[in-house]
Amino acid sequence: MKLIQVGYSLITSGNETQTVQLEQVINTEDTHILFGNNVSVGGNGGSLDAQPMSDSSADATSNIDIAWTKCNSNATPQQFGNPNQNFFRITDGQTTAPNTVNFVLALYGWKSSSEYSHFTIEATGTLSDNTAIGHQQGGLKHETTSFNGIKLATNQTGGGGFQAGSQFTMYKVVS
Amino acid sequence: MSEFGYIPDSSVEQKPFSNKGIFSPTDIYNLDQADKWTPQLGQLELIETQTASSDSTINFDTLGSYNIHFLTYTLTGNSADVGLFSRFSKDGGSSFRDSSYHYAQIRGDGEGGFTDVKSTSMWAMQLSDGANVASSGHAFNGYVYYYNLQHATKYSLNTNISSYTDKNAATSAMNYGSGAYPVLESHTALNIFPNTGNISGTASLYGIKEYS
């Protein structure tokens, strides 16, 4: 198995933003993997959400289903099922550095125009009290549109959103 | 002539995924050494594969230079009630941190039992627990993503999933979840080890490289 980098975004100081778009980076029907590394926001409490993209347009149709488990080193785990969403949530509980969120998001069939777009997520991070959290999820988008990118967004406005050092890298998985 | 001696004029900036020109083997070698050549083998880079034979631990004392590491393992052992754990070292593997780990996992078994297993003050990051790996054909199997191990200003984190044989019945069991070491320090080595007995088998550590 090889990973071939196809997209990259690093938030730099002075360019904090609530939205990151990796556009036109999925050009084959191979599985793709997006890593989020060292992702922090400018205030305590934030979510990190995603939507598929076709060229420069994010798809906001309410047909994303997701099932997820949220683990916490200091609390009982939670399980959720959310049908008919217009986005999927990679994680909540985002906060300020040195607490960060890190994740691997695997994308299946996103480029295909005959299959639904599936995804799995493994996320880890710490809350402001250093508690470890993790999200393990699976989901799909109920349409056969060919997608070639992804939009990532946080609802946290403090400091402008995603903070400097937050990094997103997309790879194509090939044999 | 450019810095590396290929055909284009020196105004061409060579960098991964944007190499321009005609290259000799020497040019390619020089560019690769300068980290400016488009990697042909991808960005999942094997750091080391280790083979254990009735050992108490597997230590990876070389981590390369990566933001994200990926570990795979398949390990038998000699205990019928054992867990698998991971620790970090900041002195190249001479000693390993043995407190302050957090983990948050779900443990499931083939008979339908699911429990949450967690701690905010653990002596290691748990990967598996309650396993029987003493019998022939039974083993720990799984993978771990480690984040920010080598950054002194970031916490070291992981996600993990494992499959093994449950200690109470000959059914499958699994753990999945995450872990954190919320101490600001740079790590130079990691290990995996059983809390009792020994392990035999292989574990491979990879680095996941990214280009800006």
Image (tube, rainbow, N blue to C red):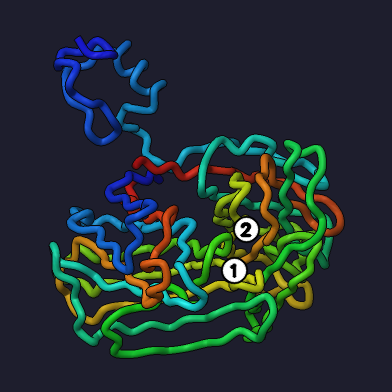
Q: Nearer the viewer, residue A166 or B162?
A: A166
Question: Distance from label 1 to label 2 (Cα)?
Answer: 26 Å
In the rendered structure, the answer to whether residue A86 lies left or right of residue B81 reads left
Q: Which residue is mark 1?
A: A126
Residue visible at 36% across and 74% down in the picture: A49
Image x and y of residue A80, in percent: 47, 88
Residue that appears at 59% across and 54% down: B154
Q: Mark yes or no: residue A40 visible.
A: yes
Where B159 falls versus B147 (above or below)?
Answer: below
Quarter occupied by the N terminus of chain B: top left
Q: Nearer the viewer, residue B2 or A105?
A: B2
Label 2 is placed on what type of residue? Asn
Nearer the observer, A158 or A111:
A158
| Label 2 element class | strand
Q: Residues within 10 Å of mark 2 (few under 14, many from 20)?
A: some
Q: Is residue A105 left or right of residue B10?
A: right
B49 to B125, vertically: above or below: above
Query: On the picture, is B36 further left or further right than B49?
Result: left
Residue B174 visible here: no
Identity, as a three-letter code, of the amino acid under mark 1 = Thr
Quarter of the image for the C terminus of chain B: give it. Answer: top left
- The answer for which chain carries disc 1 is A
Residue ID for mark 2: B141
The percent coordinates of residue B172 (x first, y second) are 64, 72
